[in-house]
Image (cartoon, rainbow, N blue to C red):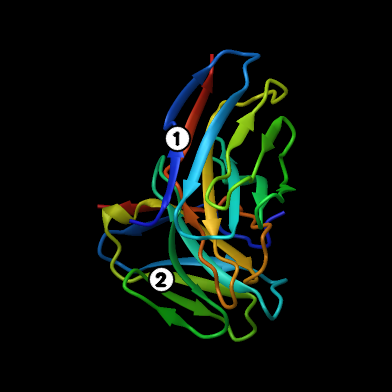
Amino acid sequence: DAKTTQPPSMDCAEGRAANLPCNHSTISGNEYVYWYRQIHSQGPQYIIHGLKNNETNEMASLIITEDRKSSTLILPHATLRDTAVYYCIVRTHRDDKIIFGKGTRLHILP
Amino acid sequence: DGGITQSPKYLFRKEGQNVTLSCEQNLNHDAMYWYRQDPGQGLRLIYYSQIVNDFQKGDIAEGYSVSREKKESFPLTVTSAQKNPTAFYLCASSGRGSGANVLTFGAGSRLTVL
């Protein structure tokens, strides 16, 4: 079973920040949080990852709670091209049985 | 450019036939994976391999077989024993060094059984 829980779908207005939550209450100390997204009929694409600290790159920001039991992916200015399914997974750097959940389907509304 | 190549992109098969999906990577990654995706669903792990000549079953391995004779190649055979093979198949690879290791995915192969 997946180690993460995400809402099945979310809506966000174009130009606004999209905040996608992920619950990983059983995360262990050496597990990273990764986010990927899958645009329709394509392979998933890596977005960002983190261990303890908040992270930011050109695509998104990742906020991890202090107890590491949940995280939020933030797309600061959502566009129609951000419409996709977003997956949150946790894994160690040596964890080879990588399990995906069903993700969150993000709809960007014009 | 480094990446993963899956072929064919689309494949049609008659019931009772085996079919092999190709996955090749030039990223020098040790680990490779096969996932299956059904419409509106997430990714389910079929098989994975950490090193050459070694692989493990994922959650839905029945009716599938793999081989890992070369580091860069991890072909998946969908056998006639797979009861519902029509799906989108995704191959991925990952490094296994210290620190975080990002999964890189191919573009996918869509198999339809007629």
A3 lies left or right of A38: right
Which residue bears the numbered disc 1? B7
User: Relative to B40, is B56 above or below?
Assistant: below
- Residue B78 sits in which quadrant? top right
Residue B39 shows up from this direction: no
Q: Nearer the viewer, residue B39 or B83?
A: B83
Same chain for mark 1 and mark 2? The answer is: no
Q: Name the spot of residue A59 as percent of width and height, x first.
A: 34, 68
Q: Is residue A95 left or right of residue A22?
A: right
- For residue A74, which numbered disc appears in the image? 2
Q: Percent x, y for residue A99? A: 65, 55
The disc labelled 2 sits on which kind of residue? Ile
Residue A7: percent from left, percent from top: 55, 57
Marks 1 and 2, how far apart at CA: 34 Å
Structural crowding at the residue carrying mark 1, measured as other residues with C-alpha within 10 Å and reported as few (<14), some (14–19) or many (≥20): some
Q: Position of residue B70 (x, y in %)?
A: 58, 48
Given contact means CB atoms under 8 Å apart, are the residues at marks 1 and 2 in contact? no
The structure residue drawn at horizontal position 68% and vertical position 62%, both measured from the top left corner, is A3
Between A64 and B47, the one lying in front of the other is B47
